Amino acid sequence: MAVVDVINAAGEKVSEAELSDDIFSVPIKKSVLHDVVKMQLANRRAASASVKNRSDVIGSTRKIYRQKGTGRARRGNIKSPLLRGGGVVFGPNGRKYAYKVPKKVRRSALKMALTSKLEQNALKVMDQFELEEIKTRTFIGVMKKLDLKKTLIITDTENRNLELSSRNVPGVKVMRTEGLNVYDVLKYDSLVLLQGSLKGIEGRLLK
């Protein structure tokens, strides 16, 4: 098991924590990480593009002019896709981009992402991150002491003061253990785990 220092809000070492090799020391496969990140981004697509087809367009169903004798094409009603303002043929209509990869693959990819942060020395474990009040300035001060900028912070329970103090700070995201995912772990330069969240991560990934 890997042993890492547990620090406080001042950046001082207060204890040590053991990280399971089954989670933080696994072989990294870029293809697996790519597949899971691609799935997450596809699932986030709004898929809101939609057009009106012939039956959705408002207009008269009356035949525009007589069938024969005009020398023109045979026209039906004004909602024809060939006419301006008519319906659209085969246009997008609420297409869904979401798909899933196997649960085992998603779990493996999350282990690989956590392993990569440990290997890059971009993972820190804190004993707690308690703020006495909702104050962005106080939160920024702690981040400067720890020399953290683009950071993902994982908590084990609701931490209202921390979540509200950090929400306006660019490049910082606070997330609970249940929401931990591959895309966010890889997106941010640093990963901060509160000591209480380690048990939650192990309980989720060691099944």
Image: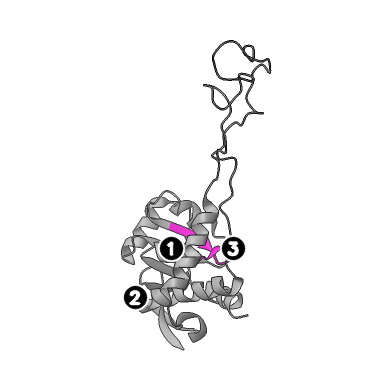
Label 3: which residue?
100
Q: Please name the amino acid that badge 3 sits on.
A: Lys
Magenta part of the chain? 173-181
Dot 3: element: loop
Instruction: Residue 139: say if magenta.
Output: no
**Residue 152 x %, y %:** 43, 63
What residue is rendered at 54% in x and 22% in y?
85
Q: CA distance from mark 3 to mark 2?
A: 29 Å
**Residue 113 x %, y %:** 45, 72
Q: Is residue 55 above or below residue 30?
A: above
**Residue 142 x %, y %:** 37, 62
Based on the displayed image, in which of its 4 quarters is residue 3 positioned? bottom left
Label 2: which residue?
120
**Picture quarter with the C terminus:** bottom right
Q: Which mark is residue 58?
A: none
**Depth order, front residue of 53/22:** 53
Dot 1: element: strand
Residue 108 horizontal side relative to residue 191, left or right = right
Label 1: which residue?
152
Instruction: Residue 174: say if magenta.
Output: yes
Of the image marks 2 and 1, the number of the one nearer the N terminus: 2
Residue 74 horizontal side relative to residue 12, left or right = right
Do the residues bearing badges 3 and 1 touch, measured as CB atoms within 8 Å?
no
Q: CA distance from mark 2 to mark 1?
A: 15 Å
